[in-house]
Image (cartoon, helix red, strand yellow):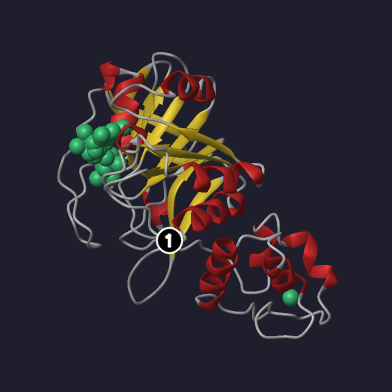
Amino acid sequence: MSGLQSLVEADGSHWQCEVRGRLKAGHRETTSAVVTGDWVEFTPTAPESGIIDSIHPRLSKISRAASGSRSFEQLLAANVDLFIVVVAARRPRIVPGFIDRALVTALLGNIEPVICINKIDLDPERRCAKLASLYTDLGYRVLLASAKTGEAVAELKDIFDGRVSALVGQSGVGKSSILNCIDPGLSIATDELMKTHDRGRHTTTAVQLHRLASGGYVADTPGIKQLRPWGLYRSTLVSYFVEMAPLVEHCRFRDCTHGAEPDCAIREAVQTGKVASTRYDGFRRMEATLEEKTR
Ligand SMILES: Nc1nc2c(ncn2[C@@H]2O[C@H](COP(=O)(O)OP(=O)(O)OP(=O)(O)O)[C@@H](O)[C@H]2O)c(=O)[nH]1
Ligand SMILES: [Mg+2]
Ligand SMILES: [Zn+2]
């Protein structure tokens, strides 16, 4: 999928398709009516091209608030079974809160998350083990991988087999490299260069779905600096923090914001170490950027 053209796969062949005009209605220029992973009905107009007539209802989606002053929903992919949150053990360093935002985005979009800490070869002392166990203790699957040495690549192959997965993470963490390591036939461009700015260079520039020789489809996505999940409100955020959600009913106030209120069960759990303070801080930072539901 790129720009106004979408690549449709049908019966093993590819068709470069345009989207029928009426489907575009209501979509802003910067987003597309059709996204990677969509199931569509199309009419061939030439041997390798066609026109998309309709889009099937989406079972899951990766949705974020587009960056910029006027916020609107930007879909990265649809009908994805697994959301692979990719970070690097080193270079680039893990953006605080990124994993938590990605987990919320996955759960909100009805997608199972998996955390992949890549470039583990750059962390021989396994400094990231603590971070990994924080999330395994919460019940998430965490893989320590290396596209360079091939570590955990067999596991990733297994995870991808028979499913549709999407790799999401900052630029330069090695998303495309992981796919090349799994399936060298893909030969996706990867790059040394990575800038820390929003408009920095990104090697992958469009979301693309790849069919793996070992089985399954994986969407490689362009690097994102920070994920702002779409369709999330202040009062619903806590339900996406698995260890905090069950505590809410023990807060003294029904509308507790888990900030400065007395007898907040979540803050108490942070004090006793039952809830990691990094997770609580991440929750508070995210909450501060959200609005209350108006209706
Ligand atoms: N040491 C080490 N380097 C890696 C590993 N995986 C990727 N790299 C390097 O990291 C750089 C970035 O890799 P890419 O695969 O292009 O990263 P990306 O996440 O696809 O980046 P964008 O497409 O910009 O989002 C390249 O120079 C890779 O060779 C790894 O496991 N270990
Ligand atoms: Mg890439
Ligand atoms: Zn509370």
Instruction: Give the quarter of the figure containing the C terminus.
Output: bottom right
Q: Quadrant of ligand 3?
A: bottom right
Does the closest atom of ligand 1 sit within 8 Å of the Cβ of label 1?
A: no
Q: Is residue 237 left or right of residue 250?
A: left
Is residue 6 found left or right of 158 in the rendered image? Answer: left
The residue under the point 35% across, 29% down is 146
The reply, left or right, for residue 262 in relation to residue 260 is right
Residue 227, how many percent across, how many down?
Answer: 43, 59
The image quarter in which residue 137 lies: top right
245 or 8, nearer to the observer: 245
Farthest left residue in view = 193
Q: Position of residue 289 (x, y in %)?
A: 50, 76
Question: Residue 272 versus residue 206: which sits nearer the camera?
Answer: 272
Disc 1 is placed on an element classified as loop
What percent of the width, then of the height, locates residue 87?
A: 39, 45
Q: Nearer the viewer, residue 79 or 254?
A: 254
Report the residue that reaches farthest toward the bottom. 261
> Which residue occupies 69% across, 77% down?
258
| For residue 167, above or below residue 214 | below
Residue at 32% across, 32% down: 121
- Looking at the rendered structure, the kind of residue marked 1 is Pro
Q: How many numbered discs, if any? A: 1
**Residue 279, image quadrant:** bottom right
Q: Is residue 16 visible?
A: no
Where 281 falls versus 201 (above or below)? below
Q: Which residue is mark 1?
A: 96
Q: Judge whether residue 282 can be spotted in this image.
A: yes
Q: Quadrant of the N terminus?
A: top left
Dot 1: few (<14), some (14–19), or many (≥20) neighbours within 10 Å? Answer: few
The quarter of the displayed image where residue 16 is located: top left
Whole-percent x and y of residue 198? 25, 62
